[in-house]
Amino acid sequence: MSAVISRKEAKSLRMRWYFTGLPCKYGHVRLRLTNNGACIECSQRLKRISAEKYRINNQQKVKQAFSNWYKKNRENILEIKATKRKLNPEIARSKDRNYYAQNSAKCKARQARYKKLNRAKFTAAESKRRAAKLNACPKWADTTKLNRVYTECPKGYTVDHIVPLQSKIVCGLHVHWNLQYLLPSDNFRKGNRMWEHHPAKISK
Ligand SMILES: [Zn+2]
């Protein structure tokens, strides 16, 4: 604990704080500010309360300030986060789980928004997963060209495998030259049954 020094003495020594050894009216035996005699604990509490009040009364302003700060420091923040994650992957995962449990509605909405904005990416990934499951994705497939087919898919069309990945007589490959754009209605009509060089006799 600090040595006792009166406010007067502290003033003459140009010290910011003094110490009486006596409790303030709220019972804190702490340092006191020389210029107004306030106890350090009480003034910290007041500061916290007024900051909280400010946050509540100026939510928009605070949000904006935070967003500005984040934009300015985004790279650094992300780098720090990534480093922390690398150092403690378990802690990061459990934090993720907790956050998700407490904000599941928000998370789901964000995922849906992301999915909507990156539809092509998701469709490409989905097709790739399906193809991998069927062993239809050869190692030599040109992934860039494959993905481009999905990202350049015209609005209203779906990406379709010309020779289907799964059919009764043959299984097509998940490669860019086996993809075509179809209207969903045509795709539905085509099903997994017919393609251009489909052997006519076996067709169902
Ligand atoms: Zn106090």
Image (cartoon, grey):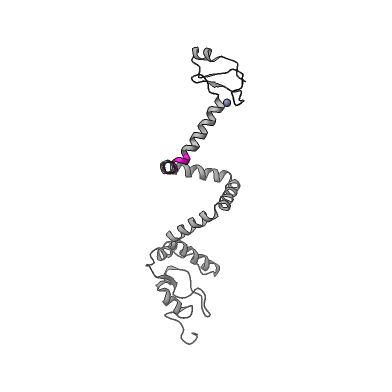
Figure quadrant of the N terminus: top right
Inspect the magenta stretch and tell me whether residue 59 lies in it.
yes
Q: Residue 86 placed where, x, y %?
A: 55, 45
Rendered residue at 45%/40% (across/down): 57
In the rendered view, does 27 fall on the left or right side of 138? right
In this view, the residue in front, 177 or 80, is 80
Q: Main secondary structure of the magenta part?
A: helix
In this view, the residue in front, 45 or 196, is 45
Rendered residue at 52%/68% (across/down): 130
- Which residues are the magenta region? 55-61
Q: Residue 75 placed where, x, y %?
A: 44, 43
Inspect the magenta stretch and tell me whether residue 100 lies in it.
no
Marker count (numbered): 0
Q: Using the rendered view, name the quadrant where residue 31 is placed.
A: top right
In the rendered view, does 165 fall on the left or right side of 157? right
Image quadrant, ligand 1 = top right
Rendered position, 180 above or below 105: below
Looking at this view, name the residue that lies furthest to the bottom: 201
Rendered position, 97 above or below 54: below
Looking at this view, name the residue that lies furthest to the front: 25
Q: Residue 113 placed where, x, y %?
A: 45, 58
Q: Residue 144 placed where, x, y %?
A: 42, 61
